[in-house]
Image (cartoon, rainbow, N blue to C red):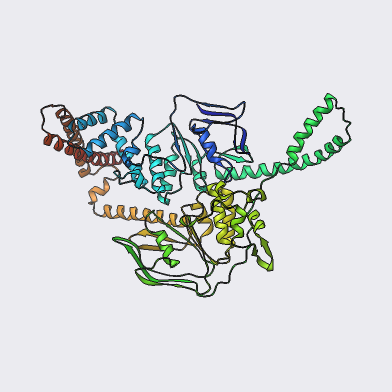
Amino acid sequence: MNYLTLENVTKSFGEKILFQDVNLQISKGEKIALVAKNGSGKTTLLRVIAGEETGEGELCNIIKRKDIRIGYLNQEPEFFDDWNIMQTVFDSENIQIKAVRAYEEAMLHPDDTDAMEKALIAMDDQKAWDVESKVKEILFKLNITELDRTMGTLSGGQQKRVALAKILIDEPDFVILDEPTNHLDLSMIEWLEEYLKSPNITLFMVTHDRYFLERVCNHIIELDQGEFFKYSGSYSDFLEKKQLRYENDLVVTDKAKKLMRKELDWIRRMPKARTTKAKSRVDAFDDIKKKATKQIDRDKIQIDIKGTRLGSKILEANYINKKFGDLVIVKDFLYKFRKMERVGIVGKNGVGKTTFLKMLTQEIRPDSGKIVVGGTVKFGYYTQDGMTLDEDKRVIDVVREIAEYIPMNKGQKLTASQLLERFLFPAPQQQVYVSKLSGGERRRLFLLTIIMQNPNFLILNEPTNDLDIVSMNVLEEFLIDFPGCVLVVSHDRYFMDKIIDHLFVFEGEGKIKDFNGNYREYQAQKKEEEKEKKKESSVAAKKTLTKAEQTAIPGLTFEEKKEFKKLERAILRIEERRKEINALFLDPNMDQQKLIELGEETNTLKDELEEKEMRWMELAEKMEG
């Protein structure tokens, strides 16, 4: 089933053409990712698909199925500041979600008996009790718990998580996501990854998370120099097929250049009065010229800036402690950095990773313990909060304010303009004002201003947010060769696996685990440990069984059979009681206090029913096995 078709769609920004005459079909069940450089028009294309912008061109045509619902997550979602999270999340046309919203609102106002009565009936009629538990699971997984907080009091990252939760809860037919993993911690990203893999979800997204691309998508579209190239398969398939395309382009371009030279010679010798046949050859020449002059875009950031010498004493944390009120950030942390270390920091949002970095750079003091910084250490600190670029300056002027020339290895020098070229800012773009740059281009420029100051200890806090994959690839290559220490906070697993030697894992309550290995190795060990724990629990449980009971496995033991029968009777009894309560709610003469008590009993029965049904299913599976 075709959900959406783009035909001959063009979009420009001023004089710059972002894409021209592109064609695209999106069918039910497809999971498509859009890959392109920063500033190429990725977000603009998503807005066109979502219907928030129109296409351009005489033959432009956008066809959408009328009966599908679209959910669009943009980079900066907008909300009513005075609405709370619950109102925002449950603002949906989904009938089941409407029932859940009415029920949640009735629970906040138990004295409104009419609302409670209607809400309970709607929950039963729409079979929305399971939906309510699903809603709470999504909110919990995205760490959205304070449902009475108003949207105006939330940070940008929190607002984007609420926007993502709202889309997942609403369950639209077609999901459009712009950088969905930004502002999510690693556990959230891994959960979202599994969630979006569902065959029922049709997806079109922009993301720089390469593991996400590998594990979720079955098609990748590359927007390259205004043209679309569609590849079937995962990210690794995309890389292989893209390489073949480049190699083919090189062959075609070489042939076209040879043919163009011949045609150019013919054009110059041709008389002014052109026949129809000659004119067709001139038109063909224009096509050949286009192919011959096509740029084979293999941009690469080349950075070989000379590093500042790093002495033997670098950075030491001696039993440092830090807490804010009851929140413990760091407890008795001890570590001594060595030359050329590549350390990654991971942990859930809010555990204090940024505070930890500020202690290491002596921006804030620990409550106790000591930070010792070596005399030769020169920090280069990249943080999203610290990105200050003058929007009224041109790109070249931002760089020249720091230095006109940059020292290179082997005594060479590089001009500011040459350095910008190597950072994928060609000469025309160097004259562009900072205010006109995309988010990723600004981050790349800001990172350049830090590297230009010739640090020998780089601290990078979420450096890959909003960077395109090309920029990330070359940044990774630079960091691998960087002649100093690197400390990185990132939720990009691919980036971390490629760069770091070991991890500081923030486990909460001030505990920081030093793991010798990358994130993938840490996850593998963590899963192995969890498997061992389950195995040990199973062994311990079996040891407590009698010999007669052990021989009954597989199948149910005598006691479990008794429990199974009791559960069936209990589940039936709870269901009957819930029906009785629903009938009582219809009594117009019932007093308010009694209604409140019945509402509380309904919640208790619901929890009890879920617990007993879960246990009943465990025993039923064991009986079948």
Q: Give above or below for 36 relative to 410.
A: above
- For the C terminus, the image quarter is top left
Residue 115's spot in the image, x, y percent? 21, 31
Residue 325 versus residue 150: which sits nearer the camera?
A: 150
Horizontal side of residue 241 vs 65, given as left or right: right
Horizontal side of residue 563 vs 11, given as left or right: left
The residue positioned 35% from the left and 43% from the top of the image is 151
Determine which quarter of the picture holds residue 62.
top right
Horizontal side of residue 469 vs 72, given as left or right: right
Residue 400 versus residue 218: which sits nearer the camera?
A: 400
Horizontal side of residue 283 vs 586, given as left or right: right
Q: From where the camera sits, is residue 625 visible?
A: no
Residue 605's spot in the image, x, y percent? 19, 38
The residue positioned 86% from the left and 36% from the top of the image is 268
Determine which quarter of the picture holds residue 285.
top right
Residue 385's spot in the image, x, y percent? 46, 55
Q: Give above or below for 56 relative to 207.
A: above
Residue 92's spot in the image, x, y percent? 36, 32
The residue positioned 25% from the left and 42% from the top of the image is 556
Determine which quarter of the picture holds residue 88.
top left
